Image (cartoon, rainbow, N blue to C red):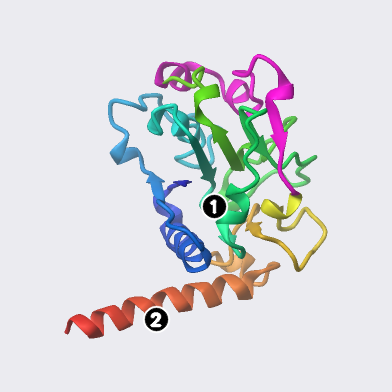
Amino acid sequence: MFIGYDPREAVAFGVLAHSIHARASTPVSVTPLMLSQLAGVFTRQREALQSTEFAFTRFLTPHLSGYEGWSVFTDCDMLVLDDVANLWALRDDRYAVMVVKHDHRPREAVKFLGQTQTAYPKKNWSSVMLFNNARCRALTPQYVNTATGLELHQFKWLADEALIGELPARWNHLIGYDPPRRDAALVHYTLGGPYFEEYRDCEYAGEWRRERDRMLACEQRERAARA
């Protein structure tokens, strides 16, 4: 699994990674997509409408996986509430990539940290992706560094839209947009997570804080054991 990393949301990455490992029934490798670790691979300059540092690096996932097997990408402003083995089991070799096919139409002009909100077809489809890496060879570092944002996020790098498979909506529940549900497997704090004061009472905020507290408790026990 590859998770987008932005230093402004470092705590979100930590809690998400903890939520993945805490519920996984099989070994999971979690890799942050940090710009500092992608020097020489990711070279494009930050763009005016780019809201996070991983807006484009997510599309390097197949390259970083050697274009072999399957890989999962997720944004960092999320919480996993189910065993990721159940997401992994949805892989279907008929497709090059699999996503939740939202009809997401933002109503606001500004989102978290004052970032400009943008609207376009297939918005948020790329926030959770299962990559069939061998079928995503078009996503070379050169292409990711030079393609437009819409070419990347609207999957223009695929020869046919029929190569985009569909995941159940519970694997990318958009808080603040989708109707509330209690069976979400992966929740997405789309507008801003409960780690921002403005969104401290959003849907699934309590679950996020409990996950954070469990993570911190584990760290405290480890420090005490080493003392």
Within the image, what quadrant is residue 192 found in?
A: bottom right
Query: Which of 109 and 74 lies nearest the eye of the viewer?
Result: 74
Q: Residue at x 72, y 55 (%)?
A: 170
Left or right for 22, reference 149 = left
Q: Residue at x 44, y 19 (%)?
A: 140
Q: Residues within 10 Å of mark 1 (few under 14, many from 20)?
A: few
* Residue at the spot of label 2: 217
Query: Which of 157 and 105 lies nearest the eye of the viewer?
Result: 157
| Of labels 2 and 1, the one closer to you | 2
Q: Magenta includes 157?
A: yes
Residue 80 location (% of width, % of height): 58, 61
* Residue at the spot of label 1: 113
Q: Tell me the kind of residue under disc 1.
A: Leu
Please provide the residue range marked out in magenta: 141-168
Q: Residues within 10 Å of mark 2 (few under 14, many from 20)?
A: few
Residue 184 location (% of width, % of height): 71, 61
134 lies above or below 38: above
Distance in Å between CA atoms under marks 2 and 1: 28 Å
Q: In this view, which residue lies farthest toward the right? A: 179
- Lower sequence index among marks 2 and 1: 1
Q: Residue at x 63, y 71 (%)?
A: 205
